[in-house]
Image (cartoon, rainbow, N blue to C red):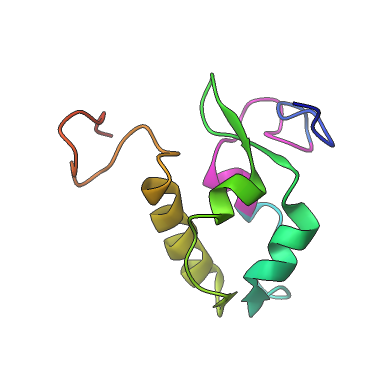
Amino acid sequence: MDWPHDPDGEEGSEGGRKYGMAILAKRLDEDEDFPLSKREFVDEHGDEPVRINYQRVVSVADIFEYVEGEEFDSIVDFHKAVGAGMRAGGFWDYHPQGENPETKHA
């Protein structure tokens, strides 16, 4: 896929040092961006790549198809909703609660 920037570059995963939710969170300022509209966030960042693991890159919009809620009051609310969405969409290789015995654990 043609991404607007290199998924593994500094603008993406900072040279491969950040994955998943860390890439999304670095787009936000905890003091200035909240409350945050899901639609505005996706409109601005939806086509950007998110490296999920060493093999998989998806778009922000792909992840947010599974994120519930239309607005997030704080960065903690954002993390909770995005984490639940990433688990629901199969974007994480493991589940800390062991919901599925076939899934790798942390």
Asked where in the image residue 34 lies, by quadrant, the reply is bottom right
Relative to residue 7, is residue 99 drawn left or right? left
Taking 24 as reference, is 87 left or right? Answer: left
Residue located at (51% from left, 27% from top): 53
Residue drawn at (19%, 38%) of the image: 100
Query: In terms of image quadrants, where is residue 74?
Result: bottom right
Quadrant where the N terminus is found in the figure: top right
Q: Identify the residue shown where x is 71% and y is 63%.
A: 41
Q: Where residue 21 appears, x then y in whole percent?
A: 54, 47
Total numbered circles: 0
Q: Quick one: which residue is furthest to the left in this view?
A: 101
| Extent of the magenta region | 11-24
Q: Position of residue 6 (x, y in %)?
A: 79, 28
Residue 37 in the image, given as x and y percentages of width and height: 66, 74
> Is residue 29 among the parts visible in the rendering?
no
Residue 54 appears in view: yes
Pick the front one: 7 or 40: 40
Q: Is residue 72 above or below residue 6?
A: below
Residue sitting farthest toward the right: 4
Q: Quadrant of the C terminus?
A: top left
Residue at position x 56%, y 80% in the image = 73
Q: Is residue 12 magenta?
A: yes
Q: Tell me residue 98's x, y (percent).
A: 18, 41
Q: Nearer the viewer, residue 32 or 65?
A: 65
Q: Is residue 66 above or below residue 49?
A: below
Based on the picture, tell me whether residue 84 belongs to the magenta stretch.
Answer: no
